[in-house]
Amino acid sequence: MLRNTRVALDTLGCKLNQAETELLVREFAKAGYQLVSATDEVDIYILNTCTVTHIADRKSRHLLRLAQRRNPNAFIVAIGCYAQRASEMLSRLDEVDLVLGNSQKQHVLSLLEERGCMPQSFGVQDELPSRHYSNLRNRAFIKIQNGCDNFCAYCIVPLVRTEKKSLSAEQIITEVRARIAEGYKEVVLTGTDIGSYNHNGLKLRELLERILAETDVRRLRLSSLQPQEITNELVDFWHEPRLCCHFHLSLQSGSNEVLGRMKRHYSTQDFERAVALIRSLMPEVAITTDIIVGFPGETDSEFQESYSFCQKTAFARIHVFPYSSRPTTAAAQMPKQVTTRVKKQRSQKMLILAEESALKFREQFLGKIMPVLWEQKSNGIWLGLSDNYIKVYIRNDNDLTNELLAVKLVKIYKDGVWGEAENETDKRKET
């Protein structure tokens, strides 16, 4: 007998947040609760919040208020980083019934039951609907590490994820095997700073080696690394074909002066060396990055340095963020804050470069056949991802959900590439 309580879990922010929400989804599903979308009628709404920018704060408040408007009688819960940083402020919102920071959010189910917000257990489900739950993708996000002590000048994360801890290889491998048993083809390893992974002397490369040796995972992807963490020993391991040909390296600025003020632990020369090392072994690799524009004191010439560096590096994707002042960080106290107007102008210029750079990257692969993991269908068109992070679209009447199917990339389409199955390509040639 299953519980009738309808629970919606929503997520903002990084892949680590997504991984932690996935764990909660499975916990609620295993306990027998009815998991629904945030747009459905709900009894409990749980938002895993983000606070990396003021926009993330605003989105969190908006979603909490929206959930209450949709379901006036629902119990509204805010968890995660914004809840950790501003618990008192969120607790004062009329729409919010419970606030749990990062140290408490993994206990949300038991805390709700203790408060009487949920009926007591009637039993559990034998089969979890987790991969089919609307908030979960066909790529499983698995947390391997938490916390950061780098204290970059702009970043609030070390103040809201204070405990730095790596999970054991045994725990991670158990989680990977469980996701494979559910049918997942791709696993994404995530954390606050996964390059610093170290559990009893076992580091990231050795962890990857164990996962690949002890599981049948088809594709393994890393979420994000720092350029100083790229070593010959690590990159050389990418001869293993199950490791996705994709590195996300956070640049943040292409100006050494700005990097110094940001308290980043590398220079643009270090970044160049990391990129060159990766590309020397993987010519088809996707290297993606994050860029902050308008950091305090950023001059026109420093912005131009950053722009030119990004242009020269030819990223597969660039995520552009206008600098957002975060309370209690070093950058918030810096003089010469860049105006909103200038930040907007620089963002627009960098976003145009990001589109041009992404287009050039995708054009390199036209005419090639690549395996794609298909995720979702809309209006008869399937969307999937290649292992080097290219969005691929195809029209197909079959159910391709979670299938790895090789297609030929034939033309640029929207923000990705249009693909054709080999038999369709042959038919087109005949006509």
Image: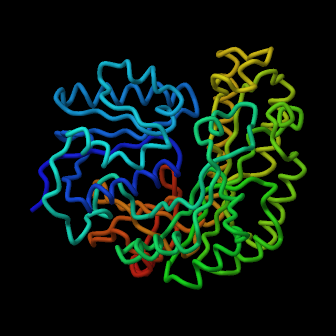
Location of the N terminus (image quadrant):
bottom left
Residue 237: image location, x then y, percent: 72, 77
> Is 419 on the left-hand or right-hand side of 381?
right
- Residue at position x 70%, y 64% from top? 198
Q: Is residue 298 above or below residue 123?
A: above
**How many numbered marks does the figure carry?**
0
Residue 272: image location, x then y, percent: 85, 54
Residue 415: image location, x then y, percent: 51, 50
**Colour mapping used in the image:** rainbow
Location of the C terminus (image quadrant):
bottom left
State the residue in front, 384 or 321: 321
- Residue at position x 38%, y 34% from top? 78
Q: Is residue 428 visible?
A: no
- Residue at position x 32%, y 43% from top? 111
- Residue at position x 56%, y 68% from top? 387
Q: Is residue 362 visible?
A: yes
The residue positioned farthest toward the front in the image shown: 114
State the residue in front, 61 or 168: 168
Residue 112: image location, x then y, percent: 27, 42
Q: Is residue 300 above or below residue 34?
A: above
> Is 97 on the left-hand or right-hand side of 61?
left
Classify residue 383 by image quadrant: bottom left
State the residue in front, 348 or 117: 117
